[in-house]
């Protein structure tokens, strides 16, 4: 399979995932969130929005932030159709799908950015190395996350993995790495300083018991992440 040129090279990206409506999305837009994630077609986690509701929110976001479809769909056609339906300009693949489907998606949807998940569990670094090698020609970035053996969830678990593994991934990957997994306003600065990722992602770390984003936590997360990224440039 021939590789296809990436859409863009990512750097110092802040992504926040999981919104219920435009009011909640606007909180993220107003504080300068770069990517806003919309989880749809999930395996174990619940969806906050219907396709139609997601499309309405994405339409209101416009070009003020990148809208990312986060999904466990396993085929290029299904994923492309859903991206088109909701207006997402990026897709984050979380399924254990063949590299051929990601390649097919990239070749048929050259203007949609692609992020592939690397779900970290105990002693699976060798497997992650193989994934990076296979998927790198067809994606714009990878995102690390944490596997939860209790629920079977492969993302949005709120659990931290060993950052030493993420740092190794940053060192070996030819594509940017977005760090996710248990991040919150209290640890994001330390995480950036230790791992040196190209971006960070948060979901449950800025969310209340009602599963809605807490504005003060969102603002603090974004501020501390930006400050930590700025320090790396000095």
Image (spheres, rainbow, N blue to C red):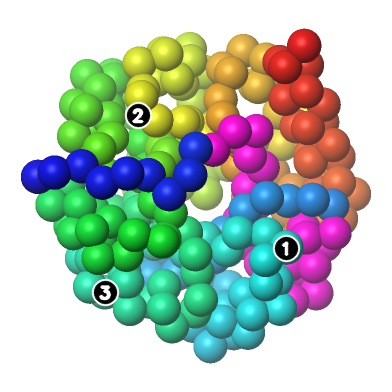
- The residue wearing badge 1 is 64
Q: Is residue 206 visible?
A: yes
* Number of the front mark, 2 or 1: 1
Note whether 137 is above or below 89 in the view shown: above
Q: Which residues are magenta?
A: 10-30
Residue at 52% across / 60% down in the picture? 68
Mark 2 in CB contact with mark 3 (< 8 angstroms): no
Note whether 53 is above or below 30 in the view shown: below
* Mark 3 Cα-neighbour bin, 10 Å: few <14, some 14–19, many ≥20: few
Residue situated in front as seen by the camera: 50 or 3: 3
Magenta segment: does it hold 29? yes
Residue at 77% across / 11% down in the picture? 234
- The residue wearing badge 2 is 121
Element marked by disc 1: helix
Residue at 35% across / 29% down in the picture? 121
* Mark 2 Cα-neighbour bin, 10 Å: few <14, some 14–19, many ≥20: some
Note whether 15 is above or below 90 in the view shown: above
Q: Is residue 182 left or right of residue 188?
A: left
Q: Is residue 189 left or right of residue 145?
A: right
Numbered badge on residue 189 = none
- The residue wearing badge 3 is 78
For marks 2 and 3, the one nearer the N-term is: 3
Element marked by disc 3: helix
Q: Is residue 202 visible?
A: no
């Amino acid at each position: 399979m021939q590789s296809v040129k990436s859409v863009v090279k990512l750097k110092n990206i802040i992504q926040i995932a999981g919104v219920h409506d435009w009011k909640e999305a606007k909180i993220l837009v107003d504080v300068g969130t770069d990517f806003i994630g919309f989880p749809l077609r999930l395996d174990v986690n619940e969806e906050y929005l219907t396709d139609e509701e997601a499309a309405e929110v994405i339409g209101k976001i416009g070009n003020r932030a990148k809208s990312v479809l986060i999904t466990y769909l396993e085929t290029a056609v299904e994923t492309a159709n859903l991206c088109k339906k909701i207006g997402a300009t990026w897709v984050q693949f979380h399924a254990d799908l063949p590299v051929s489907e990601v390649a097919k998606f990239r070749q048929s949807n050259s203007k949609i950015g692609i992020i592939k998940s690397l779900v970290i569990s105990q002693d699976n670094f060798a497997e992650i190395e193989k994934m990076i090698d296979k998927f790198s020609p067809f994606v714009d970035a990878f995102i690390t996350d944490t596997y939860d053996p209790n629920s079977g969830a492969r993302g949005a678990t709120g659990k931290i993995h060993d950052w030493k593994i993420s740092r190794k991934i940053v060192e070996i990957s030819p594509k940017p790495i977005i760090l996710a997994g248990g991040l919150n306003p209290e640890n994001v600065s330390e995480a950036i300083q230790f791992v040196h990722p190209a971006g960070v992602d948060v979901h449950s770390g800025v969310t209340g018991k009602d599963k809605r984003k807490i504005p003060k936590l969102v603002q603090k997360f974004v501020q501390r992440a930006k400050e930590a990224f700025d320090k790396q440039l000095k």
